[in-house]
Image (cartoon, rainbow, N blue to C red):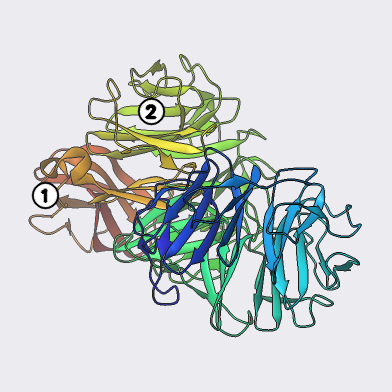
């Protein structure tokens, strides 16, 4: 998925990408088959409905808006310009403007209005001269202009909406019911006026005197548009929505578009790919080709974990960042179709990373209070604070029976007793903020704000990896067999890149095919066929065969003969056997009927060929009589076999 310009011929049900050069589009204007697009560095012109584009001859001036009167075409931004030959040539037309930075343009009859930082100006001679529209110079931070009949409306950033019906001779402020004064878009549909704000869409049916909320609330609106009886809302990262009943209800109109700010987390559960976003959790059953909402009430989800057939998600509520502290840990037993709050306490614990291992669910927190590290032995119903204290935890990873925590300020911490006590494992790491940890065979990798580090001795010592990611801001890691992927952010240009190493981090190559728009935040995931990256723009996908070659893509784990336990039933111990046809990283565990892990038999790199592991159910606290499941996760596949313990 990538940025650019898209067109829909079916009311937004589907979209196709046009031949527009990638870049930020700040204004659009259509006149038949002519389309003008304003950008941060000039304007682009298409004469064939958007399939092909040429430079419109406005240099590198930022263009914020267009307006047209007959043969006259106006472009406003860093200056105000007029063309009389369909955009082939432009002339500066700013006589009388006290500020030539034009924020918006509008036309009433033969009059042109320009919104500037100094107020609204009017021209009655096709832009040759301009004068202040009335005496309302106090209207500042103008964001948009709209016209309804002979009335001019002005949307502002922080002052709401103003209107005038006498060319600026008198002005009225329209704020009754407009609960958000930050107006970014104004459109007219019939006799109704709609205002897009950073918290949703508002509607007025009495020319701005009174406003009411529509069904689009608590979403940052970036643009509004009207076509026939349909109203469209483009959101900041949430996609495009369509309403055919004047905003009362909305449906998604984003198929084919990168429609959600997916920069939180990914998880694969069977044939389901789950992506958590600022606006909810989405599920794909076709390897990311299309997405649907996964359950309700899960906005701001930031991490996943699994124990048996139970899937956990850490959710941070209705806010748009992990700084909005509400919600808690949810669980699903149907691969994310439905969810319920796991935490039964009056004030559910908020965590921002999760891992399940050794019969426990562990949660770390990097932002909310209390910060630190917590453990649950009852599927997230209750939590206990553990030995890290109030250290902010970025990421959690298990390595066999060892827990690893990447922290803010304390580097990597290691626990050998399920989080009861912790020891530093930082020697050689040159940055104390560790944002990502990955395990490749017996090698550990730690991503920091100043590069990637490697440990071959379970964290006792670390060395920085070589060319490719040195000094980069490494925010996410993913492992696929002998292939290690690292996501690094370029905060200055708001882009990311994906690097690949096939030799345990010694050498790297960029596999991004150019900078990826948006910033990755701990959301890099490998399935058996694709690499996924979640950014603030959307979900990006690239086939593994393109990255590492078709022959190198791991073969599915096929047990031969079938995965089995013997003896079964058993009273003391049982042996689990299976024969993977391809090598890879494997997890072998035992869970009870609630899906909680009761034993971890193996975690690490496993060669092809027959393998056996013994579960001694009499060790430790022992297990009660009942049915359990042995689960093998390897090479993107999950195999299960039930076993019965009889005391």
- x, y percentage for residue 390? 67, 35
At x 41%, y 46%, the residue is 22
Q: Viewer-proximal residue, 476 or 596?
A: 476
User: Residue under circle 1?
Assistant: 579
Give the SS element for disc 1: loop
Q: Viewer-proximal residue, 178 or 585?
A: 178
Number of numbered discs: 2
Left or right of 441 on screen, residue 169? right
Corner quadrant of residue 243: bottom right
In the image, residue 269 above or below residue 527: below
Left or right of 509 on screen, residue 56? right
In the image, residue 638 above or below residue 175: above
Kindly tell me whether residue 163 is visible in this rendering.
Answer: yes
Left or right of 407 on screen, residue 465? left
- x, y percentage for residue 451? 44, 23
Give the SS element for disc 2: strand
């Amino acid at each position: 998925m990538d940025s650019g310009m898209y067109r829909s011929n079916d009311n937004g049900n589907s979209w196709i990408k046009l031949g527009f050069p990638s870049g930020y589009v700040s204004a659009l204007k259509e006149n038949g088959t002519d389309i003008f697009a304003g950008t941060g560095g000039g304007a682009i012109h298409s004469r064939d409905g958007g399939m092909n584009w040429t430079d419109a001859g406005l240099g590198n001036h930022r263009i914020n808006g267009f307006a047209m009167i007959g043969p006259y075409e106006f472009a406003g931004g860093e200056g105000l310009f007029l063309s009389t030959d369909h955009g082939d040539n432009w002339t500066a037309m700013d006589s009388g403007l006290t500020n030539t930075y034009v924020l918006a343009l509008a036309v009433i009859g033969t009059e042109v209005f320009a919104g500037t930082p100094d107020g609204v100006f009017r021209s009655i001679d096709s832009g040759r001269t301009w004068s202040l529209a009335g005496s309302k110079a106090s209207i500042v931070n103008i964001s948009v202009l709209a016209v309804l009949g002979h009335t001019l409306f002005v949307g502002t950033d922080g002052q709401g909406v103003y209107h005038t019906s006498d060319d600026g001779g008198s002005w009225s402020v329209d704020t009754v019911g407009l609960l958000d004064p930050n107006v970014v878009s104004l459109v007219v549909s019939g006799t109704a006026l709609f205002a897009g704000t950073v918290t949703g869409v508002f509607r007025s049916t009495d020319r701005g005197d009174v406003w009411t909320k529509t069904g689009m609330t608590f979403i940052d609106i970036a643009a509004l548009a009207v076509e026939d009886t349909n109203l469209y809302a483009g959101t900041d990262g949430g996609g495009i929505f369509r309403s055919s009943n004047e905003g009362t209800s909305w449906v998604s109109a984003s198929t084919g578009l990168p429609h959600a700010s997916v920069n939180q987390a990914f998880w694969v559960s069977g044939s389901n790919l789950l992506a958590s976003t600022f606006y909810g959790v989405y599920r794909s059953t076709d390897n990311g080709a299309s997405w649907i909402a996964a359950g309700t009430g899960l906005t701001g989800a930031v991490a996943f974990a699994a124990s048996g057939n139970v899937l956990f998600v850490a959710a941070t509520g209705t806010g748009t960042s992990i700084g909005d502290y509400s919600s808690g840990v949810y669980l699903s037993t149907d691969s994310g179709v439905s969810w319920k709050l796991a935490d039964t306490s009056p004030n559910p614990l908020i965590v921002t990373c999760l891992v399940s291992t050794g019969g426990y669910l562990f949660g770390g927190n990097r932002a909310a209070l209390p910060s630190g590290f917590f453990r649950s032995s009852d599927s997230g119903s209750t939590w206990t604070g553990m030995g890290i204290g109030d250290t902010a935890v970025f990421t959690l990873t298990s390595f066999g029976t060892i827990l690893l925590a990447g922290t803010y300020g304390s580097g990597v911490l290691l626990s050998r007793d399920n989080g009861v006590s912790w020891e530093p494992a930082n020697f050689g790491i040159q940055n104390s903020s560790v944002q990502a940890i990955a395990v490749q065979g017996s090698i550990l990798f730690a991503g920091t704000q100043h590069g990637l580090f490697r440990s071959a001795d379970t964290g006792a010592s670390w060395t920085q990896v070589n060319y490719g990611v040195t000094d980069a801001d490494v925010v996410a890691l993913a492992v696929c067999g002998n292939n290690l992927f690292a996501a690094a952010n370029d905060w200055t240009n708001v882009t990311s890149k994906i690097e690949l190493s096939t030799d345990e981090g010694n050498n790297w190559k960029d596999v991004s095919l150019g900078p990826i728009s948006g910033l990755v935040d701990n959301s890099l995931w490998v399935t058996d066929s694709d690499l996924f990256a979640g950014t603030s723009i959307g979900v990006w996908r690239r086939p593994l065969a393109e990255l590492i070659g078709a022959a190198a893509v791991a073969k599915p784990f096929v047990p031969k003969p079938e995965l089995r336990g013997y003896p079964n039933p058993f009273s003391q111990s049982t042996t689990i056997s299976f024969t993977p046809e391809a090598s890879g990283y494997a997890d072998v565990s035992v869970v009870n009927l609630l899906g909680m892990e009761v034993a971890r038999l193996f975690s690490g790199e496993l060669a092809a060929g027959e393998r056996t592991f013994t579960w001694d159910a009499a060790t430790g606290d022992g297990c009660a009589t009942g049915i359990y499941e042995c689960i093998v996760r390897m090479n993107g596949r999950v195999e299960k076999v039930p076993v019965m313990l009889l005391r």
